[in-house]
Image (tube, rainbow, N blue to C red):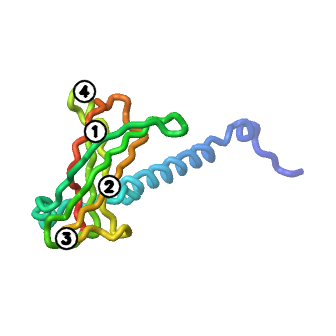
Amino acid sequence: MASRKPKEVLDRPLLGIPLMIIALILVIGGSAFWYVLKYGASAPKAPVLTSEAKAYVRYLKLADVEMKAHESYVKQAIVEIVGKITNAGERPLKQVQLNCVFYDPYGQVVLRERVAIVRAKAGGLNPGETKSFRLAFDSLPASWNNAMPQLVIASIDF
């Protein structure tokens, strides 16, 4: 006759295997979370305004800056900022970026967006040259005060 396991062994649930699987999942998940926190892909750092660029900012002149609002074909409000930038210095520029800072009625920042107004692909900005720019914003927060945003030069690439 074949040997049989005692009845108490058959009635006992196998708790060890599910607990080991749960523990393994927690260890793998915790390790993945730690890895993402430590080495995860972060947003690329925006170029900073170098000391060389800070010294050159005084040669960049914004003029005829206006804000216009209109409705798009899909009934969405579009706010445009148009103007001109002049390079009054002696160096050619590949790229110039602005921070457009939008405020609420209480003076709190509700949106800060970095945009390029001079691009290398468009020929840059040579000494003495003036170029027009147009910035379109289609998703401004409802709390925005509808005033002209603060325009701050954020980076210059020579």
Q: CA distance from mark 4 to mark 1?
A: 10 Å
The amino acid at mark 1 is Phe
The image position of residue 124, as x and y in percent, is 30, 69
Q: Earlier in the sequence, mark 4 or mark 3?
A: 4
Q: Which image quadrant is residue 156 in?
A: bottom left
Q: Judging from the image, what secondary structure is the residue with disc 2 in?
A: strand
Q: Earlier in the sequence, mark 1 or mark 2?
A: 1
Q: Are marks 3 and 2 in contact (CB under 8 Å)?
A: no
Residue at image position (21%, 51%) is 63
Tell me the residue that label 2 is attached to: 133
Q: Which image quadrant is residue 116 in?
A: bottom left
The image position of residue 12, as x and y in percent, is 69, 37
Tell me the residue that label 3 is attached to: 127
Q: Which image quadrant is residue 89 in?
A: bottom left
Q: CA distance from mark 4 to mark 3?
A: 39 Å
**Of marks 4 and 2, the one in the foreground:** 2
Disc 4 residue crowd, few under 14, some 14–19, many 20+, Cα 10 Å: few
Which disc is residue 105 wearing? 4
Q: Are marks 3 and 1 in contact (CB under 8 Å)?
A: no
Residue at image position (28%, 61%) is 131
Q: CA distance from mark 3 to mark 2?
A: 17 Å
Q: CA distance from mark 3 to mark 1?
A: 30 Å
Q: Nearer the viewer, residue 32 or 110?
A: 110
Residue at image position (19%, 60%) is 49
